[in-house]
Amino acid sequence: MFWVCLLIYWLKGNPKYAAALEEMNSKKICQFGPWFKFLFLALAIIAVAVLMFVWSNLRFREPGTKSNRGQSQNPLDYRKPWILPFAHSSATKRVASPSDFINCVHQPLVQDRGAVFKPQSELSGKRFAYVWYASSPQYLCSALVALKILQNHRSKLGPLPYELDYVLMFVDSTLTDKAFANLTEKWEYEGGVLQNVTSLAKFAKGKSTFYKPTYQKFHAFQLIKYDRLILMDSDGFTMHQLDHLFQLEFPPGIQLAAPQGYWFRDKGVVIGSDPKCRGETVVAVTTVMMVVEPSLQLYYRVRRHFGSLKIDTGKPNFDMDIVNKEFSCGDEVLILPKHYGTIDSEYNEMEPLSSITEVCRNQANIQFLHFTSRGKPWTRTGGENRVMYKQEILKEIRPIFHEWALKVRHICPETIQVDM
């Protein structure tokens, strides 16, 4: 009877049914009180929401397997359903989101059926590189550990049609440090390539010395002998091989991809302060890992910001600031899922970020893990490390850090003494 009355209420305004409605009301079969009007409105809203959900999933259904082979469909035409956060509206922002459920929304690209990769046959004769930069023996030691971890992941790939180098960038003056010089020899012994670069520290302003060496990473933009490279900070390591990023299709005109800085401000979304995007919503990226198609033009675009100051605070612009100012602000960077720039603070129960990402944190999805929580393992005391890695860090990820520490003891124990 409820549904009959609901139908009658819907038809109430039609004169054609007025007589029937009057008869029912006289018999008190259907009483249309305020509660009924409220219930009718609620059910109507739910019905519309369900219909829109069904429509969006039909309209924006995932592309077929042909697109993943690079044969037919443009990957950038794919969009997630409308109910997901706002940033699925452009090719560069397809996987970006300011949501509390940022880990739930995103997947590594190898699991994302909206991502399209070039077939390996198209990569024949191409030259790629994994690139690190180091400014001290400790960072070079960490880079060596990262190199060995990555080589172990890649050992399962089998024959590949392209050339690949493991490149270490460093400033010549650091070779005066005997420990640094010895580690560069180890780099070559492990199959790596050394790339001497000029110092850019003179451009860095401000009292802080921590971020001044970060300008050095931009030298990778000049390594034009490579068709594409993956540039990683030395204070982190991969959890999987990342060769699929060499196959990833970039949108037209895009030369740079970077993970969303999901911890930054409002879950990786900021309001632009630069003149070309002032007041606009901008997806912030992190530079702990970048995928770059090198060119001198790309390098000069970042170089012109060296030594510049932020408009809103007057503080110096360093690597992350420059990339966001020059590329994110103009929607010229392909946003990668946050798993390509995961920071360890997410897995430290004492950090606020841990509670934010708790809902659907997935360790298996991490592609690159960066040391961030209260410094680096080599900047903390042994006691601080023991507390962090035996009490604060979540149990499920502790073995990963312990394995990293074991590799340090094997590769460069004289440089980093770490007790986890």
Image (tube, helix red, strand yellow):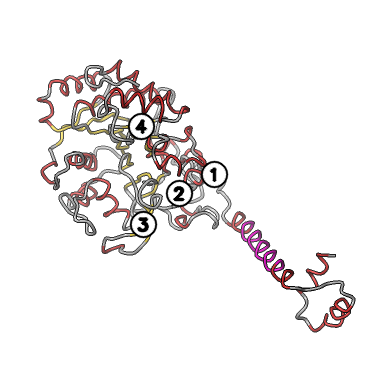
**Dot placed on the residue nearer the N-terminal end, 1 or 4:** 1
Q: Which residue is mark 4?
A: 162
**Dot placed on the residue nearer the N-terminal end, 4 or 2:** 2
**Dot placed on the residue nearer the N-terminal end, 4 or 3:** 4
Element at badge 1? Answer: helix
Task: Say if mark 4 contacts mark 2, CB within 8 Å.
Answer: no
Give the label, 3 or 1, closer to the camera.
Answer: 3
Magenta-span inclusion, residue 46: yes
Q: Which residue is mark 3?
A: 282
User: Which residue appears at 44% of the width and 28% of the height?
Assistant: 397
Q: CA distance from mark 4 to mark 3?
A: 35 Å
Range shown magenta: 39-54
Magenta-span inclusion, residue 399: no
- Using residue 297 as the reference point, say whether residue 399 is left or right of it: right
Q: CA distance from mark 2 to mark 3?
A: 14 Å
**Dot placed on the residue nearer the N-terminal end, 2 or 1:** 1
Q: CA distance from mark 3 to mark 1?
A: 33 Å
Element at badge 4? Answer: loop
Residue 158 image position (x, y, % from top left): 43, 24
Q: Which residue is mark 2?
A: 95
